[in-house]
Image: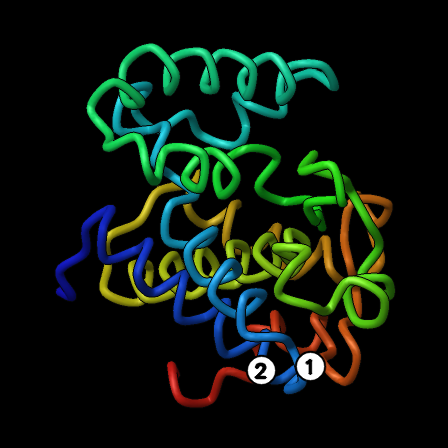
Amino acid sequence: VPETSVLGHCFFFAIMTLLLGRESNPNMCEQRVINNFFSALFHDLPEAVTRDIISPVKQATDDLPNIVKKIENEIVNKELVPLMENFFVQEIIDYTSDEFSNRIKNDSGKIQNVSWEELNTKYNQNKYFPIDGRLVRIADHLSALMEADISIKHGITSVHLINGRDGIPYSYKGVGQIGKRVLHLAKVDVAKLCDLESWIFFH
């Protein structure tokens, strides 16, 4: 049975984000590549205090994800920030706040949400501190899918794990929550990438 840990998941997720970023746009500026990697690496940092809140609970109502995120931010500021050195606090907050949205820092230093197209043109410069939040989200789903599939194939499973594994590819086929999914990033076909039937190396 493959050993796993929260840190192992975060590192695997960060590597997946790095690879998907290179595949979707090999011309990303240096800061963007760095930001994407560390956004993925630190995406679960609030759970060091809150512990894991499973997706079915987070998404029980339309408003609940925003409420959970607000609570996580408050707890991070209260419990984790005092343990950090001042020189990197803001950078960590930039990585963990609104982590699945495409964003940059505008000329006034404020976080601004932008489109993927804008990230690849106007804001693909180090000075804008660009982050591909939607790419990070795709890597998050793909990592969860792979980890769940491996666990199930090793006999460690539950109905929730099976439903979670099967639900991710379904949602990227243009069915269900299509409005919340990015189906393509440049030449990366996310639906094909999440197709379990094509994962010959895991069968």
Q: Amino acid at mark 1?
A: Asn
* For the residues bearing labels 1 and 2, Cβ distance under 8 angstroms: yes
Q: Looking at the image, which is closer to me, 4 or 95?
A: 95
Q: Where's residue 115, x and y in %?
A: 84, 54
Q: How is the image coloured?
A: rainbow
As measured in the structure, the alpha-carbon distance from the residue carrying label 1 to the one carrying label 2 is 5 Å
Up the image or down, 184 lies above or below 47; here it is: below
Q: Residue at x 86, y 45 (%)?
A: 179
**Residue labelled with disc 1:** 25
Instruction: State the image coordinates of residue 118 (x, y, percent, origin top left).
Output: 85, 62
Task: Point out residue 122 in the picture as x, y percentages from the top left corner.
Answer: 85, 65
Residue found at x 64% / y 51%? 133
The three-letter amino acid code for the residue at tag 2 is Arg
**x%, y% of residue 77?**
39, 16
Compare residues 99 and 34 and report the one nearer the observer: 34
Q: Which mark is residue 22?
A: 2
